[in-house]
């Protein structure tokens, strides 16, 4: 990307600030405009010599937010050139727009395996129940697709659990608390994140511990893995054993709506007893989200943290995209278990209680063309 400081064909925005760090609104602004294929360059003014600003280019490392010596920030938008060719741009947007259909197709290809599994276990009740079959299909589909989704998102989720996410962006150093104490994993699925949670186990601070961890030493002492899908719950227990978490990880084989009901499972999670809730791509699947998110809020201790990484309703982009997401949700609801594309989880979470702190945002890398946009961050009760 060629950079010139002044040019009549370019629109300049100057932003002078005495802040110690690059303000989040600039970082978000940067990510947003990069996604629109406008060349954006962020400079910090480090000094003025003979009336000319001496500019240091920060664009190469926008995460470098600790630059207290600079006098201010300077953003240059180059509206005349794009670093990406039109064909690449169109292909990347087509990828985003077709994403739900690819998931639906992959789920469809798991129908024969689901039938075979249900016949093999003589589970004809589930085989001939539309809702039961849908759940079974999703459980088997997720065993294939879940690890791939995990691979693509692990860096982000690890950063989240280490307290290194703010404004939707990964930071080098911890900004908030890392996951610790008694943890409730909502919709744990087949245990994709069990190995990651194992790294935060209490007392593990030597080999294998994660960098920049706040609250180091406290770590996780107990995990409730809430998973109502029987196929997933079985795979979850197997995974928990594989990663050696069986002494602290209890699989709760019911929906979150029953976690405080001792008649539904072999235990009870008391209100105000949980230090951290973690939910990775699961609020899209729970029934009655307002009611159940409220229930989860009550389980959190005052000061407890909710670690969120969820796909949500389209809020950016034009109304056509919102309509398209609604349309994609029709086949999606048939082939993706209880998952729904158009859940406004962010609004529900924010409105659920008196949070002391909310740091929840879409990734600044989102282009505005995502049919499956995500939010990431934490809420502190
Ligand atoms: C998309 S999967 C995500 C699984 C896991 N978090 C992962 O990232 O691999 C959503 C999970 O939510 C679970 N789920 C559905 N209804 C639920 C409920 N009422 N309570 C808790 N989990 C539920 C589904 O069974 C499914 O395993």
Image (spheres, rainbow, N blue to C red):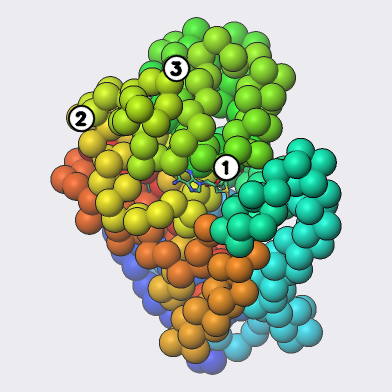
Q: Which class describes the residues within 10 Å of circle 3: few (<14), some (14-19), or many (20+)?
A: many
Q: Position of residue 9 (x, y in %)?
A: 54, 91
Q: Nearer the viewer, mark 3 or mark 2?
A: 3
Residue at the spot 51% in from the left edge and 40% down from the top edge: 228
Disc 1 from disc 3: Cα separation? 22 Å
Q: Is residue 240 above or below residue 104?
A: above
Q: Is residue 12 above or below residue 289?
A: below
Whichever of labels 3 and 2 marks the residue nearer the N terminus, that label is 3
Question: Residue under circle 1?
Answer: 229
Q: Quadrant of the N terminus?
A: bottom right
Residue 369 bears which disc, if any?
none
Question: Residue under circle 2?
Answer: 302
Residue at the spot 65% in from the left edge and 65% down from the top edge: 335
Question: Residue under circle 3?
Answer: 222
Towards the viewer: 64 or 378: 378
Towards the viewer: 152 or 246: 246
Q: Nearer the viewer, mark 1 or mark 2?
A: 1
Judged from the image, the secondary structure of the residue bearing numbered disc 2 is strand
Whichever of labels 1 and 2 marks the residue nearer the N terminus, that label is 1
Question: Is the Cβ of the residue at disc 1 closer than 8 Å to that at disc 3?
Answer: no
Mark 1 Cβ inside 8 Å of ligand 1: yes
Disc 3 from disc 2: Cα separation? 18 Å
């Amino acid at each position: 990307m060629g950079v010139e400081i002044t040019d009549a064909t370019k629109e300049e925005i100057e932003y002078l600030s005495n802040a110690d760090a690059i303000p989040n609104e600039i970082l978000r602004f940067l990510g947003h405009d990069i996604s629109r294929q406008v060349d954006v360059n962020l400079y910090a003014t480090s000094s003025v010599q003979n009336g000319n600003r001496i500019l240091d280019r920060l664009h190469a490392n926008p995460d470098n937010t600790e630059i207290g010596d600079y006098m201010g920030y300077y953003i240059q938008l180059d509206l005349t050139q794009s670093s990406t060719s039109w064909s690449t741009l169109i292909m990347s947007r087509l990828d985003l727009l077709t994403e739900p259909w690819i998931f639906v197709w992959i789920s469809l290809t798991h129908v024969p395996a689901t039938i075979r599994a249900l016949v093999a276990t003589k589970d004809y009740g589930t085989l001939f129940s539309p809702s039961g079959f849908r759940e079974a299909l999703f459980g088997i589909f997720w065993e294939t697709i879940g690890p791939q989704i995990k691979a693509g998102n692990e860096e982000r989720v690890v950063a989240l659990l280490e307290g290194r996410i703010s404004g939707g962006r990964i930071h080098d150093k911890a900004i908030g608390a890392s996951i610790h104490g008694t943890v409730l994993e909502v919709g744990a699925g087949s245990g994709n994140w069990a190995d990651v949670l194992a790294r935060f186990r209490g007392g593990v601070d030597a080999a294998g511990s994660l960098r920049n961890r706040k609250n180091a030493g406290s770590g996780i002492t107990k995990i409730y893995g809430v998973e109502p899908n029987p196929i997933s719950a079985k795979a979850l227990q197997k995974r928990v054993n594989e990663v050696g978490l069986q002494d602290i990880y209890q699989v709760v084989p019911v929906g979150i709506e029953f976690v405080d009901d001792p008649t539904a499972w072999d235990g009870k999670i008391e209100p105000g007893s949980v230090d951290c809730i973690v939910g990775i791509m699961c609020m899209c699947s729970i029934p009655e989200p307002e009611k159940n998110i409220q229930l989860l809020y009550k389980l959190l201790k005052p000061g407890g943290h909710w670690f969120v990484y969820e796909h949500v309703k389209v809020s950016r982009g034009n109304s056509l995209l919102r309509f398209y997401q609604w349309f994609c949700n029709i086949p999606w609801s048939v082939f993706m278990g209880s998952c729904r594309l158009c859940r406004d989880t962010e609004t529900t979470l924010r409105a659920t209680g008196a949070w002391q702190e909310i740091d929840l945002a879409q990734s600044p890398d989102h282009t505005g063309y995502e049919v499956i946009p995500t939010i990431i961050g934490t809420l502190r009760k």
